[in-house]
Amino acid sequence: MLTLERAKELNASMVSQEALLLHEKNVCYAMGAMAGHFGEEPEHWQAIGMLHDYDYEKFPEEHLQHTKEPLLAAGVSEEDVRAILSHGWGLCSEVKPETNLEKSLFTVDELTGIIQACARMRPHGLEDLEVKSVLKKFKDKKFAAKCNREVILRGCELLGMELRQVAELCIEGMRPHAAELGLLGTSASA
């Protein structure tokens, strides 16, 4: 089983951009909360989240086309590689999310971007961020405009969960790591 430590090692060989690393950490911690919800191993799901954009920095136009072979060669299981590939379903991959792990990654990849943007605007960041604030900003298509809302809603549908519930789990997973994620709020930097 892929460990978080191993995922970080593999990731370090391909990813150096601060913004991308931050995104991967957001997804990593949200995935831990999703794993807990489904009664699965949080660290394993966090490892998948940490590694999901493995090839993006070096191959942004060919995202996920340079992931499978290197990760398999590095000893990552076919099941874990498939989970990583599935987060690009319909965008840059034909691998449809089937398991709760895959469906969760597909959904939270984009959703954490909206949560991150919301937290950055608040005086206390993630500390007091409420789901209703995220849902309000979700409706504003100009806010965090690069985050694909259709993908998020499609993912929620695949999971059989409401957007509110998934957003709550993501916030829950990210909140303990607010300092590491730079999401302590505007008052922290004042």
Image (cartoon, rainbow, N blue to C red):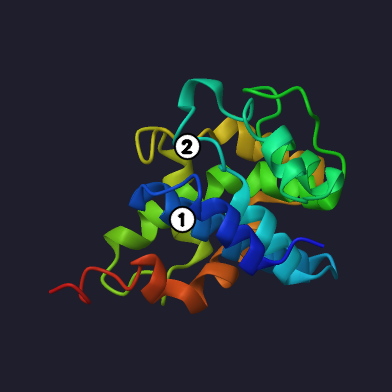
Disc 1 element: helix
x, y percentage for residue 39? 85, 70
User: Of label 1 and label 2, which has the lower sequence position?
Assistant: 1
Residue 184 lies, in percent from the top left, at 33, 73
Name the residue located 42 percent from the left edge and 56 percent from the top edge.
Answer: 22
Asked if residue 39 lies left or right of residue 106, the reply is right
* Three-letter amino acid code at the position of disc 2: Cys
Give the total of numbered labels.
Answer: 2
Identify the residue position indicated by label 1 in the image: 115
| Disc 2: CA contacts within 10 A as few (<14), some (14-19) or many (>=20) | some
Which residue is painted at 44% across and 58% down in the image? 133
State the residue in front, 59 or 103.
59
| 116 relative to 92, above or below | below
Q: Residue furthest left?
A: 190
Examine the rendering and report whether any part of residue 156 can be seen.
Answer: no
Res 122 → quadrant:
bottom left
Crowd tier of the residue under label 1, counting other residues whose Cα lies within 10 Å: few below 14, some 14–19, many 20 or above = many
Front residue of 27/85: it is: 85
Left or right: residue 99 versus residue 94 is right
Residue for badge 2 = 147
